[in-house]
Image (cartoon, helix red, strand yellow):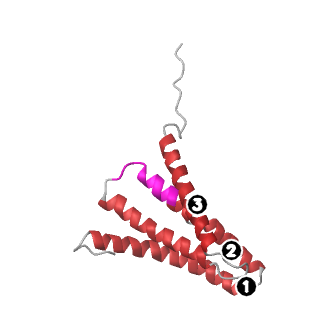
Amino acid sequence: MDEPARRPLPWQGEWPVIGAVAAGGGLGAAARYGAGLLWPTARDAFPWTTLLVNVVGCALMGVLMVLITEVWTAHRLLRPFLGTGVLGGFTTFSTYAVDIQRLTGAGRLPLALAYLAGTLLAALAAVALAGAATRALLTPGRRAV
């Protein structure tokens, strides 16, 4: 009697991708941690460092996505390494959530709400504008948006 064919697990063969994400994530998280050390935020102050990290990370994601989908033929590990890894580790929406909770707990609800909405709007604008600017710079004569 023949043995039934064994189906591979969904993640088998993905070890190079997992390694690229892990290596990139370590670099991105270290950079984010370094930003927090360089520009610490007081407990009840507006978290400018986290906002800046998230906006810069989103802008870089906009640039990266245009480069690897419209300009270059990228190696298959570049997107997981830079996008999911480095930029995923660099941006810090978990800290963003903790910052909102911290501000709310300190009785700074209007500031917490401004930070909640402002970060989302700034991050979305950063990725869209950076992508459009990259596209416009690298493909002259083509409309950016």
Q: Quadrant of the C terminus?
A: bottom left
Label 3 amino acid? Answer: Ala
Q: Disc 1 or 2, which lies upstream in sequence?
A: 2
Specify the farthest residue to the bottom: 110
Label 2 amino acid? Answer: Asp
Q: Is residue 113 above or below residue 58?
A: below
Residue occupied by mark 1: 108
Q: Is residue 27 above or below residue 138?
A: above
Mark 3 or mark 1, which is nearer to you? 3
Distance of label 3 from label 1 (alpha carbons): 28 Å
Q: Quadrant of the N terminus?
A: top right
What range of the chain is rendered magenta?
A: 74-86
Q: Disc 3 or 1, which lies upstream in sequence?
A: 3
Residue occupied by mark 3: 29
| Prevalent SS, magenta region | helix
User: Dot 1, crowdedness within 10 Å: few (<14), some or many (≥20)?
Assistant: some
Residue plotted at (42% across, 73% down): 128
- Say which mark, if any, is on residue 99: 2
Residue plotted at (72% across, 74% down): 101
